[in-house]
Amino acid sequence: MPDALTSALDRVVAWAGRPVIPTQIKGGLSHRILRLDTEDGDRWLLRVLDPRVSAAGLGIPLDLEIVNTTRAAETGVGARVLLTLPGAVLLEYIDGPTLDAPAVRDPAMAEGIAEACRRLHAGPRFATEFSIFRKQEELLALCRRHGLGTPAGYEDRLPAVAEIEDALAARPPATVPCHNDLLPENFILDGTTVRIVDYQLSGNNDPAFELGDIAAEADFEPDMVDRLTRAYFGDEDPAARVRLHLIMSNITWTLWFSVHHGLLAEHAAAAGFDYEAEAADKFAQAVRDLDDPGFGSLMDAVRGRRPSRVPRKAPPAPPAPPKEA
């Protein structure tokens, strides 16, 4: 085992006063995650943070991730923090199913997911700030500096990124503590309550990004974006803002996977995950939405030039009755 992991396990054993049985959990794309069991039935989760991840711009500084994890726990949404260690944190083991994309797309889950986000967003502010636009610039600079590959045509879309930022800046909301990386596997269903784990990219941000990121990661159809928006905000008016953030999630996390593939290639082998293919897929989804005929309507709605609910295509009018002779 790596020294950091061995050291963390030794400290947990000293804290617990009894041996633990570690089992590595697959699914973490950056850090090491282990389930720890004791012979008398206790079970915990150990998250061992890899400093190379934050050094590569793929996460916030490790000490601040632990701070944010602790603050999320105060809301009851994050796992309880049992012990903080140098570069690691021991957490409550949340006993329940980890969600996947079909589960998150289930309309019945919208209220539970929205409620989890509202609780997190109403909690203590995080120790970090987050902007998807600054993260996109940071990751692109890393790709250029290290000569990392990006999907063909990526830089041709940069003018659209600037236009989206300008539109969203027209009426900015107050920022709240956001997770910012809500792929389906970061939701766990604890009985009937949705819990949120893994605060690697957490920071105070626009709450509409949180919803747009969820929608991007689970590949929502527009109707499901509207449903989640309504469940969180109480109406669909911010849906255009959420949908623009959906696009920015895909544009930016395209580069996250490009950087991970280029700078931390050994993680891909350990995780059994194709980071390069994921980058291509996210960019394809972003291009799909940028080229959609309704993109201009989203921009106008967010700028306040028309009602923020983007109109649906009207059904064809019924044929007129025949004229009397």
Image (cartoon, rainbow, N blue to C red):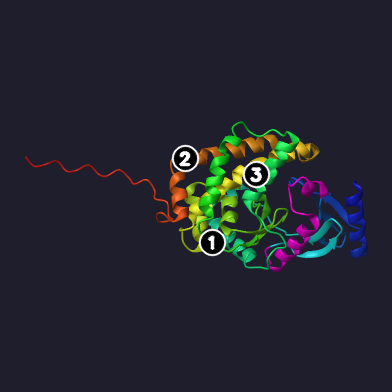
Which label number is shown at residue 292?
A: 2
Compared with 150, 19 (above or below) is below
Residue type of the residue flagged with mark 2 = Asp
Residue type of the residue flagged with mark 1 = Tyr
Q: Is residue 98 left or right of residue 11?
A: left
**Residue 279 part of the magenta segment:** no
Q: Is residue 209 left or right of residue 12?
A: left
Q: Which quadrant: the C terminus?
A: top left
SS label for mark 1 = helix
Which label number is shown at residue 253?
A: 3
Task: Pinpoint residue 164: horizontal percent, then vertical percent.
Answer: 53, 48
Task: Pinpoint residue 191: horizontal percent, then vertical percent.
Answer: 65, 62
Comparing labels 1 and 3, the label whose residue is closer to the camera: 3
In magenta, the rendered stretch is: 50-77
- Give the residue drawn at x 69%, y 56%: 202
Q: Is residue 153 left or right of residue 235?
A: right
**Residue 125, quarter of picture:** bottom right
Residue where numbered disc 1 is placed: 232
Comparing labels 2 and 1, the label whose residue is closer to the camera: 2
SS label for mark 3 = helix
Q: Residues within 10 Å of mark 1 (few under 14, many from 20)?
A: many
